Image (tube, helix red, strand yellow):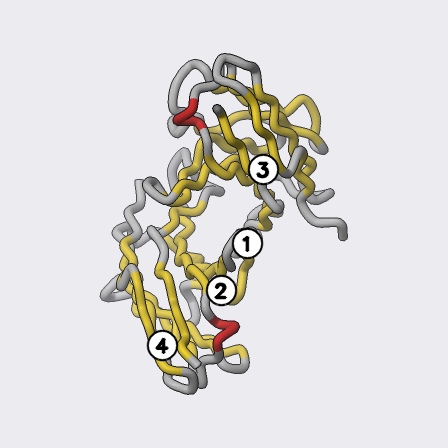
Amino acid sequence: GENVEQHPSTLSVQEGDSAVIKCTYSDSASNYFPWYKQELGKRPQLIIDIRSNVGEKKDQRIAVTLNKTAKHFSLHITETQPEDSAVYFCAAHRNRGSTLGRLYFGRGTQLTVWP
Amino acid sequence: DAGVIQSPRHEVTEMGQEVTLRCKPISGHDYLFWYRQTMMRGLELLIYFNNNVPIDDSGMPEDRFSAKMPNASFSTLKIQPSEPRDSAVYFCASSPVYRGKKPQHFGDGTRLSIL
């Protein structure tokens, strides 16, 4: 199968600073990498995703980078705000095998942005 | 687009009772996923379906858990008999047919408490 590891498990930053969350994956056949944000008591929501044929993608204050050679991808949040506080999950889609279609999730990062 | 609809939102029941969780995926989505989320174990995939057929149920914790998808617009997850350790938030998610991307859309979840 696929194994996705996510670091750090907790991250505290001051408002206005940047936050970076990193994930690694094990299967070179993985080709799609979404990021989800889950606020307390709410459902996970897709915030950005990237396909393996792209190295970087940006959407306002968030960006994702992908290094296929090293098998790692990262979420970057700039100019953090208190409302960015949430748990962030990375995931990978493995493009082969009997489990085609499922996402493999990291364990999550609790981001706290202090005002 | 109404999103993924789950019911009930909250369920409190006594140990030994049967629990049925319901999910209506987004129309046109071919994949449906059931997850369980706890503080200790994070987000766990229990089972998923493609075109109403179960693909991988290796995450189902034991025989007390069962899931069905009788048609493209409805799925159930049953626990019988329920135990206190089944207390968790259960999410249903759906995603469209593979087009190079597989974004999963989550429902609001069912918060289950077994007394």
Relative depth, front residue between A11 and B68? A11
Q: Secondary structure under badge 1?
A: loop
Asked whether the beta carbons under mark 3 and mark 4 sit within 8 Å of each other, the answer is no
Q: How far apart are marks 3 and 1 (CA)?
A: 21 Å
Residues flagged by tags 3 and 1 on a common chain: yes
User: Toward which corner of the image does residue A51 lie, by quadrant?
Assistant: bottom left
Task: Name the residue at 52% across, 35% down.
Answer: B34
**Callout 2, which amino acid?**
Asp
Mark 3 vs mark 2, CA separation in Å: 26 Å
> What residue is at 49 percent from the left and 12 percent from the top?
B16
> Which mark is in front, 1 or 4?
4
Q: Is mark 4 on a helix, strand or loop?
A: strand
Q: Which chain carries label 4?
A: A
Q: Residue at x 31, y 69 (%)?
A: A11
Secondary structure under the numbered disc 3 in the rendered image = strand
Q: Which residue is drawn at 42% across and 60% down?
A: A87
- Pointer 3: residues within 10 angstroms few (<14), some, or many (20+)? many
Question: What percent of the width, then of the height, locates residue A91?
Answer: 40, 54
Tell me the CA gap for discs 4 and 2.
Answer: 17 Å
